[in-house]
Each structure stands twice: as C-alpha cells, then as structure tokens.
Image (spheres, rainbow, N blue to C red):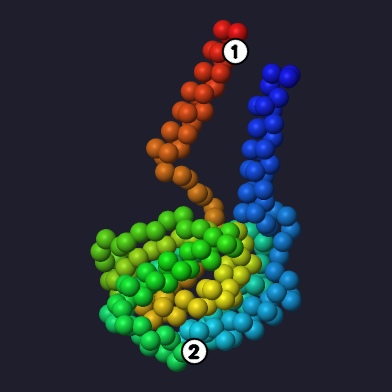
Amino acid sequence: MKRLRFELLLGAVFAALWFATWAWQHPGAMGERISAGDSQRYQRILAAAPVQPEVRAQLLARVNEWIATDDGRAVYMVNVLRLYKGLQRFPGSPSYGGTPQESNARYEAAAGPVLLKHGGYPVYAGVTQGANILENRPELDHWDRTLVVRYPSRRAFLEVLVDPEFQKVVPYKFMALSVMLVPTNVELLIPELSALLGAALLVVYLAIGWWRASRRR
C-alpha cells in the first residue's frame, strides 16, 4: 500500500479536480435556479442595456419568459450572424471607424474573458460556405457566421449580459451585425470521432502497459 501512496494521492487530487469542474459546469444538478431577486436585478440592468431600443425591448420580453421556465440546466446558445454592409449607429453607440468585421472582432476579443469568467465557452464556430441550400428567402439567407456557446446555466448567460465589462463592448456587436440568438437544451453531443477514438486507444494502450508491467513484477 505504501508503494502506491503517491498514485492514490494523485488519483484523489485528480478526482477532486474533476468533480469541482463538473459541479461548476452543471449547477442545475446542485439545485441552482434563478431567484426572484436575481430576476429583478437582471431586468433592471437589461432595461438600460447599450443596444438599439427595439433590441432592448425584445430582449427584456423574451428573457422574462425564459427565466420563468428556468430548469438550472446547461444552455447551448446558437448564434447565427449576418454582418451589415456598414456600421449601424444608434443612440449611445461608440464612435468607431472600423469595418463591421473589425467591430465584431473587437467585441469577441473583449467578450471572451467575460464568457470564461462565468463558465461559458464556445463549442463550435464556423463561417458559412454559401447561400442557404433549402430556401432562398432574404430573411433566411446570406448569413456569415455561426457560433454555438455553452453556458452552465441560464443564470450564467444572464450574468454575462449584465457584467459591466461585457456591457462596455456589446455595442460593437450590434453595430456590426444582426444576430439570431436561440437557446437550446442538449440532446446529443459527440466529440470529433478521431479525437474520441484516439482517447479510447490511449486508455487501452496505457491499461495494457500497466498490466504487462504488473505481470513482470
């Protein structure tokens, strides 16, 4: 047993680290929901969000509905983005002389650390390869980019929205593009198959090595 003391201690540390990460990323399993007090705080801050007035009104209405059905589970937020041909100004937007692409890049660079601070991270990002294959209607076509971002909970997503650092840069996003923002539950999530196979083969390789070494001893 003494010979395995280091391995057992290391295993316990790794297990504790894994559980802490799991609990951080799955707060719903611990019974966390958005409280009435938090809901009022989100509504108060979002009512003054630095975005177009029509966007703010829609945001408030739909966030209220979404909060009311909070289940505490993780959220996969689908972002479908269409860049404007030129920057769209609105009351309170910053004076910025770049292109829409540069404005959005500035937003994403600053928003990334805020996202990570609240437990969110992107799981997919891609640039469109052409027009919509199924239908060719202007409102459904000519998107430029898609992002899928995982948040540990609805609370985490809303904490990002009301974070002062996020509110400083969010106008750069809305000056640059229109966006469909669709929250979803996850039903199936499969890693890239070659990575999955590589991890499985590595586990088998290490297990066989351990078994052969133990037989030699």
* Label 1 sits on residue: 214
Residue ID for mark 2: 53
Q: Secondary structure at mark 1?
A: helix
| Image location (x, y in percent) of residue 198 | 43, 33
Q: Amino acid at mark 2?
A: Pro
Mark 2 surroundings within 10 Å by alpha-carbon count, few (fewer than 14), some (14 through 19), many (20 or more):
some
Dividing the picture into quadrants, the one containing residue 35 is: bottom right
Q: How far across and down, in percent of the image, does residue 170 sit? A: 47, 77
Report the amino acid beneath label 1. Answer: Ser
- Assign the N terminus to one quadrant of the image: top right
Q: Residue at x 68, y 57 (%)?
A: 28
Looking at this view, name the residue that lies furthest to the bottom: 91
Taking 159 as reference, is 83 left or right? Answer: left
Could one spot residue 61 in this view of the protein? Answer: no
Q: Secondary structure at mark 2?
A: helix
Between circles 2 and 1, the one closer to the viewer is 1
Residue sitting farthest toward the left: 130
Image point (69%, 80%), residue name: 40
Query: In front: 66, or 84?
Result: 84
The percent position of residue 12, horizontal first and vertical second, equals: 69, 35
* Label 1 packing within 10 angstroms: few (<14), some (14-19), many (20+): few
User: Are the residues at dot 2 and dot 1 in contact (C-beta closer than 8 Å)?
Assistant: no
Name the residue at 42% across, 66% down: 109
Horizontal placement of 88 versus 18: left or right? left
Does 23 sit above or below residue 204? below
Compared to residue 214, the image places residue 134 above or below, namely below
Of the image marks 2 and 1, the number of the one nearer the N terminus: 2
Q: Is residue 146 visible?
A: yes
- Quarter holding the C terminus? top right
